[in-house]
Amino acid sequence: MTVLRAWALIVLAAVGLARPALAEPVDLELILAIDASSSVSFEEFALQMGGFAKAFRHAGVIEAIGAGDLGAVAVTMVQWSTPGDHLVVLPWTVLRGAGDAQAFADAIDSTPRHIQSGGTGISAMITYVSGLFDGNALESKRKVIDISGDGRDSHGPDIRLARAAAVARGITINGLPILSDEPDLERYFVSDVIGGPGAFATPATDYDAFADAIRAKLIREIRGNPMIGSLNDTKPGKG
């Protein structure tokens, strides 16, 4: 082998190593953003987490995951409160069937509350979690932020500007307003929080109703089309 050929092989190998790994294709990239601010008691937080775990064990959610073109969705979970208090508690995880969904539900059950105080910084949280889609080694046609919370944005930048920036990146923001403290919170979520293609809000009348609401919401999000039912009779968001 000539010296020139040897150097050529070394250069080609180096170029190959420098190439980024191919992104894994999925039907949906979904961020679950869980309110952990001071307005949420430990019992209420447990009801949120338990509701998500129960939903991922539900046959309807598992069926929805398998119904996509690729039969795969990627999910991550974030706890949030005031601006600067955001934490990824479950990393991006690809779910391809009942076993993966069950394992993710088990992981939710094993995840403690890491944030225990602070105000309701929805706008700052939207900005933070939007960046989680970058460099996650995933590829999809749909990117969704799923926000559950029991209050209005009270800290941080203008929420409509944060929403507009996310929507401009092709991200859809859906909401699960919990109406126990503010009965008209759904109206606020529809007008100021949700946005993007197909955006919707699914209200829970209180924390006890959260499990049913999140199950219906996840099925609709994963399938990517409207479903009929009282829990889904919500108005479209303003992009």
Image: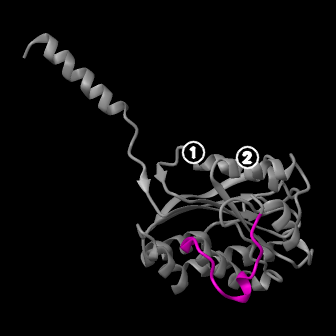
- Dot 1, crowdedness within 10 Å: few (<14), some or many (≥20)? few
* Residue hosting label 2: 165
* Residue found 73% across the figure and 46% down from its top: 165
The color scheme shown is one colour
Residue 68, image x, y percentages: 45, 71
Q: Earlier in the sequence, mark 1 or mark 2?
A: 1
Q: Is residue 16 above or below residue 38?
A: above
Q: Describe the element under mark 1 as helix, strand or loop.
A: loop
Q: Residue under label 1, please give it.
A: 134
Drawn side of residue 95 relative to residue 29, left or right: left
- Looking at the image, which residue is at 76% across and 77% down? 234
Q: Residue at x 79, y 77 (%)?
A: 43
Task: Provide residue 192's location: percent of width, then percent of height.
Answer: 84, 60
Question: Which quarter of the figure has residue 205?
Answer: bottom right
Write the residue at 20% across / 16% down: 7
The x, y position of residue 166, in whole percent, is 70, 50
Predominant SS of the magenta segment: loop
Circles 1 and 2: CB atoms closer than 8 Å? no
- Residue extent of the magenta highlight: 222-237
Residue 63: image location, x then y, percent: 48, 81
